[in-house]
Image (cartoon, grey):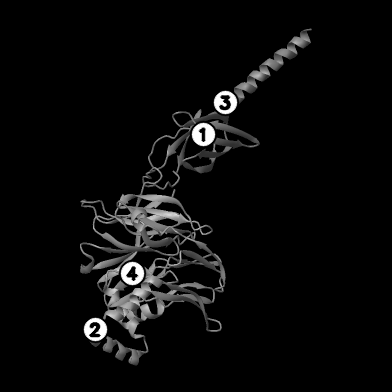
Amino acid sequence: MKKIITFLLFLFYASLICTQTVQNDSVVVRFTCFDQLHNETVQNVTATLKIGDKIFYKKASQKGVITIKWLKNSQVNGSFNHPLFETTQKNYELKSNLDTIEFIVSLRPIKVVDLKTITVKPLGTPYTVYGSTVLNVADFEIIENGSLVLLAYKKQLKNGSEILLYNGQEVINSFQVPEVAEELIHDFRGNAHIVCKDHIYGLQINENKIGIATLDKAYFYAYIAPIVDSLKTKLLFSNFSKDYPAFNYFSFDQKDSAYAKILHIEDTFMMELYRSEYKWMDVRTKLWARQRELESGIDAEVIIGANYFTQSIYYKELYAPLFHKNDTIYIFDYYKDKLYTFDLNGNAIDSIPIYHHYQPKSTGWKKNLIQDQKTGTIYAHFELDGYSYIGKINLLTGIIENKVKLAYKYVDKIAVYNNEVYFIYRPFESLQNKYLYKQVMI
């Protein structure tokens, strides 16, 4: 019995000695987490501390402090994580004669982009695309990548204008127009052109760079403007003249230089009035027209009509636009009340009746069809009481669907891109410059 008691006492004293030894060899380690940028403690830092084969997971206190107790002369591999800071990883040596070792953990903030305030508006509310206290927007064209070419001026367009290349966030390039600008137009490839008094300037846009080329005005309207669209190797064009109430649509195959007539457009009633003008002319004018007929080969009735009837209030230019969507060509012949469809080779597929151009005084029909350059959808433009309405045309039925009313009265130039309507507007009796707006189609 005495031997057992002696053995137990030995174990008790041995454990006391070991405990005392461990206490003498251990140290308290304090990691304080600091924001490197603002020099203040960081809360909610999660630490992974690896010592030998053991791993400890700790979380910083409200003062940014992480505490652990371990043996001296050890090495701690610490990894400190926080959602707003970069992860910091480092090895720490626990060598000190003191009972507590202090380490500072410097945390670097993650780079944060300070976004501008985003205003969320109700559906149907216009957004300002471009507005300036210095410049007015006179015209615009949407190019292939969705960027905008803006024709802008300070006081009056005739006193000088600028071309701005705008990506929706900032103006990335600009230059002064060398002449008095009138408007912006685009050709069959979608390239923007500046129409000036004496010349037309073609714009070549490559990323952030703008190239400019001078074109003869007569050449442009004679050889480029008649081309309506292009299909792989084919060009679609017309012989439209604003002074004649009939024209044809053609296709030209660039492979074999073959021409093909697609459709003849004619306002028969207008043509009858046009030609009958010859009957009421005096003898001297008729003789002049006959002489011109001998020189040019153009019918004398057409010469009289072009020079006199086109100046009357009864003459209206023809409007029968052609559009290309996917693998189909659409022609709106408003003088036969038909929407014709053709394949890419110009072969007739079908025709359906259309009536949305009837009673323009009550419907507000504006003789203006607009194609979404992104989706290919075709819209009709109406205006009533100063408000513009954009209605989607169902190409299978010819019926107008989902008319959208623009929020502002008397807007200028309307275009549609990616189901959004773009327009220029300045509030009535306001000092605000002309801004470019857009409104989502709903």
Q: Which residue is mark 3?
A: 24
Give the answer, above or below, for where 205 lies relative to 115. below
Question: Which secondary structure, mark 4?
Answer: loop
Picture coordinates of residue 33, whole percent (x, y): 46, 36
For residue 397, side relative to residue 280 (left or right):
right
Please, what secondary structure does the residue beneath circle 2 have? loop
**Which residue corresponds to mark 1?**
96
Say above or below: 317 vs 352. Answer: below
In primary-sequence order, the first of circles 1 and 3 is: 3
At label 2, the amino acid type is: Asp
Mark 2 crowdedness (10 Å alpha carbons): few <14, some 14-19, many ≥20: few
Marks 4/1: CA–CA distance: 99 Å
Residue 260 to residue 59: above or below: below
The residue sitting at 26% across, 59% down in the picture is 136
Distance between mark 4 and mark 3 Cα atoms:
107 Å
Is 253 rendered above or below residue 315?
below
Q: Which residue is mark 4?
A: 316
Q: Nearer the viewer, residue 50 or 59?
A: 59
Identify the amino acid type marked 3.
Answer: Asn
Mark 4 vs mark 2: give the one in front: 2
Say whether marks 1 and 3 touch (CB < 8 Å): no
Task: Give percent across and percent down for residue 67.
Answer: 52, 29
Q: Does residue 277 appear anywhere in the picture?
A: yes
Amino acid bearing label 1: Ser
Residue that carries the numbered disc 2 in the rendered image: 282
Image point 39% across, 57% down: which residue? 381
Q: Position of residue 119 (x, y in %)?
A: 37, 44
Judge the density around disc 4: few (<14), some (14-19), many (≥20) Cα neighbours within 10 Å. some
Measured in 3D between alpha carbons, the distance from the residue under mark 2 to the one under mark 1, in whole angstroms, is: 121 Å
Between 29 and 131, the one nearer to me in the picture: 131
